[in-house]
Image (spheres, rainbow, N blue to C red):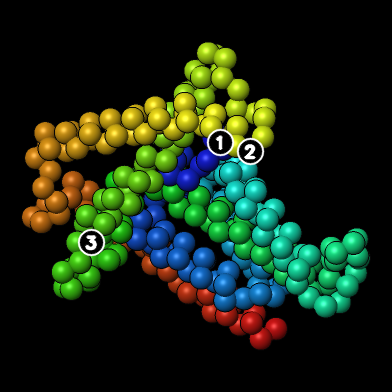
Amino acid sequence: MLRDITLGQYYPVDSCIHRLDPRTKLFGTFIFLVSLFVTSSVPGYLLASLALICCIRLSRVPISFMTRGLKAVFILLLISVSFNMFFTGETVIFRLGFLRITKEGLELAGFMALRLVYLVIGSSVMTLTTTPTQLTDGLEKSLGFLNRFKVPVHDIAMMMSIALRFIPILTDETDKIIRAQKARGADFESGNLIRRAKAMVPILVPLFIAAFRRASDLALAMEARCYHGGAGRTKMKPLKYARRDRIAYVIMTVYFILMFATRFI
């Protein structure tokens, strides 16, 4: 399960999605996520499915690697679908005791499941095709107007980038700790809920220690390189829009207009 978390990982390959400006990818991800809440019709989700499939194909990231992150949210997906299926709507299709499946519940559960799946995959497309450095630069550039209101945009972007980068690192660390504890005879799968919760203590303690140690090493490394925030800093690779970025903005605008139009279909 831990190896199935793809958020924060980067898949190095040469593709047109990888070559896009990070600001373009951030804007595209935002537009895609908003469009999922703009529409609730079958044509809208068909259009969103087509757009997502095209992005995955253009990114050249294997679909099996892209969908691996869904396993980490399977429980949340199951709970969301179950609540909407059994406790929503009036037109009963099937009844078993106090549980009833309704027509409206099935429709809402289907849309909720698709929305959650597309949220995860859509976010993964951005993180898998954008390095942490590019993501930090893109966030800082995109939110640069907030500097006028004394908002520390660079610090916020840096913290978000580091947090995303630490997700796969801590995931691997947790996997190593679990295997080491199992080799020492630890049991994490048998017993009731309370016993399983207590069995997590030998995992959480070394994980927190390792996380603090990595954070301390990172702080020392940044200080050794004379890092002092965003004021006066220059970029080795300044962000510049290319022709492909302008084309991508046009495509995203047309996509959002079409998604909004599906509300009336």
Front residue of 56/202: it is 202
Instruction: Report the amino acid beneath label 2.
Output: Leu
Quick check: 143 left or right of 124?
left
Instruction: Report the amino acid beneath label 3.
Output: Val
Q: How far apart, in angstroms, are the residues tagged by discs 3 and 1?
A: 39 Å
User: Could you tell me if residue 227 is visible in this image?
Assistant: yes
Q: Secondary structure at mark 1?
A: helix
Residue beneath disc 3: 153
**For residue 221, above or below residue 84:** above
Front residue of 214/237: it is 214
Q: Secondary structure at mark 2?
A: helix
Residue beneath disc 2: 193
User: Dot 3: few (<14), some (14–19), or many (≥20) neighbours within 10 Å?
Assistant: many
**x, y (%) of residue 132?**
34, 45
Q: How far apart, in angstroms, are the residues tagged by discs 3 and 2?
A: 43 Å
- In the current view of this chain or complex, which residue is farthest to the top? 184
Mark seen at residue 197: 1
Q: Residue at x 50, y 27 (%)?
A: 175
Instruction: Report the amino acid beneath label 1.
Output: Ala
**x, y (%) of residue 10?**
43, 41
Mark seen at residue 45: none
Front residue of 146/56: it is 146
Which quadrant of the figure contains the C terminus?
bottom right
Contact between marks 3 and 2 (CB within 8 A): the answer is no
How many marks overall?
3
Contact between marks 1 and 2 (CB within 8 A): the answer is yes
In terms of image quadrants, where is residue 14?
Answer: top left
Q: Secondary structure at mark 3?
A: helix
Q: Residue at x 90, y 69 (%)?
A: 93
Front residue of 48/83: it is 83
**x, y (%) of residue 78?**
69, 53
User: Dot 2: few (<14), some (14–19), or many (≥20) neighbours within 10 Å?
Assistant: few
